Structure formats: structure tokens, C-alpha cells
Amino acid sequence: MVELDISIIFAGLSIAASVVYYASVLQNANKARDRELIYQKFQSISIEYIKTFNEVMTMKDWKHAEEWEEKYGQENNLEAFSKWNYVMLLYQLAGLLLIQGADPDLIFELYPAGAVIELFELYEPVFEYMTSKKSWNLDNLYYLYNEAKKRRPEVGQ
């Protein structure tokens, strides 16, 4: 009887130790993934990225999406469109990472909520135009924007 009780106690302790170990492994894996995300983002931040982002944020001389397309669309201004598309793809990726469970605090350290909101609201008419006319899928960007608005509701419109 005593041997049976000791066996049960040891089995219970082994299971508890295994659970603690597994939780530790998962936590370390999540930290490693977050470090990798920071490293990848750091590699993409250069003077050229900052210059490109600022150029995209100054493309404000349009009143409606059709006019934006005339000035900055792929067929009329490939260089400006390429810069715009590059920035949008980075923010789409940030939204996708957030949807897939990346740490929201980390995402909004890398992509500040205020910048997300300003970028989105500046180009919202273009996004609507492109999704309706050209079948673009910007769900990840919309998700990122909505999460940013929850964090910084005072920013933007």
C-alpha cells in the first residue's frame, strides 16, 4: 500500500514537472519568435525605408482615389506606386502577424499605432477604391488599423 502511494506521488510529480518544463519551452519559443520579429524589422529599417515612408506620407495632393491613381498609380507613376506598395505590404504583414497571434505590444512597438492610423486614414479612399475595383484584399491592414484605434482612439479623424 505504501509503495503504491509513493508510486502515485512520483507519477504526479513527474507529470507536474513535465508540464512546467513544457510551459517553459513554449515561453522560450515565443520569446525567440518575438526576437526574430524584432530582428527582421530592424533589418528593414534603413534610411531608405524612412525616406520611402515619409514620401508616401506626403503624397497628399489628391482629392479622390481616381485622382490618386492618375498621379501615383502603377501605370502612371511606377516609382511612386512601388514605394506606396512597399509600405502598404509592410503594414499588411504587421496585420497578418497580429492576426496570427504575435504579441500586440511588440507589433505596436514596431509599427506605432499613431503611424498606422494616420497612414490608413490618409489612404482609406484609395483602399476602398482598390478593393472594389481591383480585387485587392486588405483585410490584414484593416485589422491592424482597428486594433491601433483601440489603443489610440484620440488619433486621426
Image: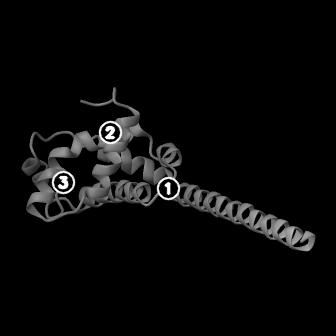
Q: CA distance from mark 1 to mark 3?
A: 33 Å
- The residue under label 2 is 117
Q: Identity of the amino acid at label 2?
A: Ile
| Corner quadrant of residue 121 | top left
Q: CA distance from mark 2 to mark 3?
A: 21 Å
Marker disc for residue 123? none
Q: Is residue 127 left or right of residue 5?
A: left
Please name which of the two marks, 2 or 1, marks the residue nearer to the observer: 1
Q: Work out whether 79 lies above or below 119.
A: below
Please name which of the two marks, 2 or 3, marks the residue nearer to the observer: 2
Residue 132 position, x and y percent, is 10, 58
Q: Secondary structure under badge 1?
A: loop
Give the mark nearer the N terminus: 1 vs 3: 3
Q: Is residue 8 left or right of residue 89?
A: right
| Residue lying furthest top | 154
| Corner quadrant of residue 14 | bottom right
Residue 113 position, x and y percent, is 41, 39
Q: Nearer the viewer, residue 156 or 140?
A: 140
Q: Secondary structure under badge 3?
A: helix
Q: Nearer the viewer, residue 121 or 4?
A: 4
- The residue under label 1 is 102
- The residue under label 3 is 72
Q: CA distance from mark 2 to mark 1?
A: 19 Å
Q: Identity of the amino acid at label 3?
A: Tyr
Q: Nearer the viewer, residue 129 or 67?
A: 129
Residue 103 position, x and y percent, is 52, 51
